[in-house]
């Protein structure tokens, strides 16, 4: 099977869908001629023309707003917000229009819209190019929120997102575009071309939204992670020698509670890891769900490892980033009880 | 500061929109006047009834009446072709009736009943009709402007020849996304007509106190979008300008802005006592510029209809409105199971 970077896999996903369905249109800032700042849309304009893959002004609210109108009409816009941090001006359209159109029109109008956003840190982007705003979306009824962790998933989940009849927020951990980054910023990253999850099948395939993947089977403690943190958790398990079961959630809403529950009932312990700030982060929701479902199976308190409650720092990026050392400590603590 | 405060408190004299009218305001023939009269009267009576029902506690929450502005939407609808889309903000009851949506369904949505157009999920500000190409009712000021632009994009993409009529008010005209939309619409030559219903008050703030440029027809100048000011109280002027705008958009020349100079007789919403303007001002507008009265006078004087004939129209309209009110009062409330439907396609 051919190996691809995550960017190539994402591009392939859009390409497959544009080929199959002329309702699919792709646009955003520098998305057309330039091919996207991360090159996710490179070549799509040349292949499908300027009416289907095009540049927009720097107008995030306008981009998402017009996309909602197109989706209401019946097109399937797949838009790029260049960095998730640029999403805030468009938040009104995402929450008040995209997420609510089906409900308030009693199902007469729907919003089959995908908003792609490179997300997360690890690239010295500082506070406006590194944030992980997933909890701002999971909190909104009427939205689906997805975050792939590897090229193969990225393509399959993106295809599912484009085919989905409802709006999907597609968060791409940009630190993973070129390889599975495990938080050891001082070591070289294995490129996807040398990693089995870099194998991306040709043509059309969809990975259903709401199905988690077990990345490492284990019996001692369940680790719930998504995006970059999947690899950080793998490194932490390897370095501490703890037989952790690492679950890559892949989709936060809908959430695969079944897989989570089965694992925690087996291990009796649960550590939740995310890069976003701790307070009111998605980890809080996961923790509540796990204790509601598995209270009598728990041997230790559920713990969260997350970004500190600070703006995303520049110089002190690696102090903020919940790397393998912090996750490892949490695993050891969970095993002490 | 003191100067600004003085300026803000000074009551601003209202311009007479009739003076702005195109000198050769086109004439309507008898049938056009009759149709305009019926349509506008339906909206007026419907809104009067909504106001009453609100007072009786049958309608809860927010309710923004269109009384006074009827000529705008009725006149614009006369310029449309089947397939053209309409989208507007929260003062939307008139637009829905003008689009041919059933009075019963609109009223039942106001009262939050299961026969409402959104099954009681939307309320006054959020109703839709796929069948009539009505893309809603939107409660966030200005949000519909981007959507209308997107619908126009879809029209161009599909080459379907449709034009999207995108309505918003003088208040929404100060929102940032309006200008993002103007830019994109002109850049991509989208078939959209932006209709700014300037009713002179953004909630409780007069245009002079909220807008640096009160000539809203010029709001597209920096994007090269043509615009004109229209006497929005004279349906003939609305129709004539609407035809120019719709033709421009449909022919592939891009967006067009119409500033409809109009006036709402009631407060911004039901909870607004409208203390920011004088009773005199409202009375003068009602007596001298009422859109329905203008047509009524023509029907009596030019077309020689009798008072009885007009009364017959009025009672027909009242019948429709009463029937809608009756339905909206007795239709059952939504089933509790509806709480979790239509959020996503599948339930989670």
Image (tube, coloured by chain):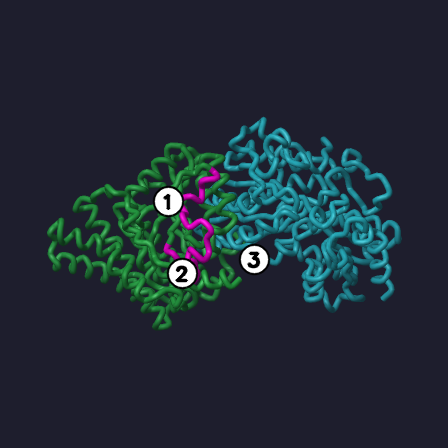
Chain colours: A cyan, B green
Q: Which residue is mark 3?
A: A141
Name the residue rendered at 58%, 39% in the picture. Answer: A28
Of helix, strand and loop, which one carries label 1? strand
Left or right? Give the position of B59 relative to A15: left
Foreground label between 3 and 1: 1
Residue B337: x %, y % from top left: 48, 64
Q: Which residue is mark 2?
A: B124
Name the residue rendered at 58%, 57% in the picture. Answer: A140
Residue A1: x %, y % from top left: 72, 31
Q: CA distance from mark 2 to mark 1?
A: 25 Å
Residue B210 lies in the magenta-colored region? yes
**Residue B201 drawn above or below residue A109:** below
Q: CA distance from mark 2 to mark 3?
A: 21 Å
> In the displayed image of the protein, which residue is found farthest to the bottom?
B56
Q: Which quadrant: the C terminus of chain B? A: bottom right
Chain ID of residue with mark 3? A
């Amino acid at each position: 099977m051919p190996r691809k970077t995550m960017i190539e896999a994402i591009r392939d996903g859009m390409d497959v869908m544009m080929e199959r369905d002329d309702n699919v249109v792709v646009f955003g800032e520098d998305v057309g001629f330039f091919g996207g700042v991360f090159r996710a849309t490179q070549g799509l304009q040349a292949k499908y023309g300027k009416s289907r893959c095009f540049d927009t002004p720097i107008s995030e609210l306008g981009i998402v707003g017009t996309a909602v109108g197109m989706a209401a009409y019946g097109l399937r816009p797949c838009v790029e917000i260049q960095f998730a941090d640029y999403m805030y001006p468009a938040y009104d359209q995402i929450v008040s229009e995209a997420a609510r159109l089906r409900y308030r029109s009693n199902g007469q109008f729907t919003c089959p819209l995908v908003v792609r956003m490179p997300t997360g840190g690890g690239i010295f982007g500082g506070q406006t190019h590194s944030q992980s705003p997933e909890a701002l979306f999971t909190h909104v009824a009427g939205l689906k929120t997805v975050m792939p962790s590897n090229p193969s998933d990225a393509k399959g989940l993106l295809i599912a997102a484009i085919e989905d009849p409802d709006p999907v927020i597609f968060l791409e951990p940009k630190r993973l575009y070129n390889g599975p980054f495990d938080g050891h910023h001082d070591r070289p990253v294995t490129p996807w071309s040398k990693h089995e999850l870099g194998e991306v099948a040709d043509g059309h395939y969809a990975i259903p939204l709401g199905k988690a993947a077990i990345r490492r089977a284990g019996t001692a403690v369940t680790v719930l992670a998504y995006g970059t943190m999947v690899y950080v958790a793998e490194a932490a398990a390897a370095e501490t020698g703890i037989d952790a079961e690492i679950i890559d959630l892949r989709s936060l809403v809908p959430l695969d509670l079944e897989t989570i529950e089965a694992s925690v009932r087996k291990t009796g312990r649960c550590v939740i890891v995310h890069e976003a700030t701790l307070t009111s982060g998605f980890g809080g929701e996961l923790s509540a769900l796990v204790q509601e479902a598995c209270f009598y199976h728990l041997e230790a308190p559920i713990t969260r490892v997350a970004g500190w409650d600070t703006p995303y720092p520049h110089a002190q990026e690696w102090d903020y980033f919940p790397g393998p050392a912090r996750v490892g400590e949490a695993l050891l603590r969970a095993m002490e009880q | 500061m003191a100067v600004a405060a003085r300026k803000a408190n000074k009551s601003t004299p209202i311009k007479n929109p009739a003076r702005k009218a195109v000198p050769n305001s086109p004439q309507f023939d008898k049938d056009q006047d009759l149709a305009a009269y019926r349509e506008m009267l339906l909206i007026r009576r419907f809104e009067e009834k909504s106001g009453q029902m609100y007072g009786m506690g049958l309608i809860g929450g927010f309710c923004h009446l269109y009384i006074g502005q009827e000529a705008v939407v009725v006149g614009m609808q006369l310029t449309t072709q089947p397939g053209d889309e309409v989208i507007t903000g929260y003062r939307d009851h008139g637009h829905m009736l003008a689009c041919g949506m059933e009075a019963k369904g609109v009223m039942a949505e106001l009262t939050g009943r299961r026969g409402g157009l959104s099954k009681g999920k939307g309320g006054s500000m959020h109703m839709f009709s796929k069948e009539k190409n009505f893309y809603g009712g939107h409660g966030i000021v200005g949000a519909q402007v981007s959507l209308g632009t997107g619908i126009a994009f879809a029209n161009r993409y599909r080459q379907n020849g449709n034009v999207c009529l995108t309505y918003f008010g003088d208040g929404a005209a100060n929102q940032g996304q309006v200008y993002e939309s103007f830019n994109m619409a002109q850049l991509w030559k989208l078939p959209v007509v932006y209709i700014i219903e300037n009713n002179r008050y953004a909630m409780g703030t007069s245009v002079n106190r909220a807008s640096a440029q009160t000539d809203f027809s010029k709001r597209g100048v920096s994007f090269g979008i043509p615009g004109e000011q229209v006497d929005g109280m004279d349906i003939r002027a609305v129709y004539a300008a609407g035809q120019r705008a719709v033709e421009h958009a449909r022919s592939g020349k891009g967006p067009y802005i119409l500033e409809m100079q109009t006036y709402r007789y009631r407060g911004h919403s039901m909870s607004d006592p409208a203390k920011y303007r004088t009773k005199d001002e409202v009375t003068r507008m009602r007596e001298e510029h009422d859109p329905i009265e203008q047509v009524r006078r023509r029907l009596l004087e030019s077309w020689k209809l009798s008072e009885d004939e007009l009364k017959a129209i009025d009672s027909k309209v009242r019948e429709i409105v009463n029937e809608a009110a009756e339905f909206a009062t007795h239709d059952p409330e939504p089933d509790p199971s509806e709480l979790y439907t239509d959020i996503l396609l599948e339930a989670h």
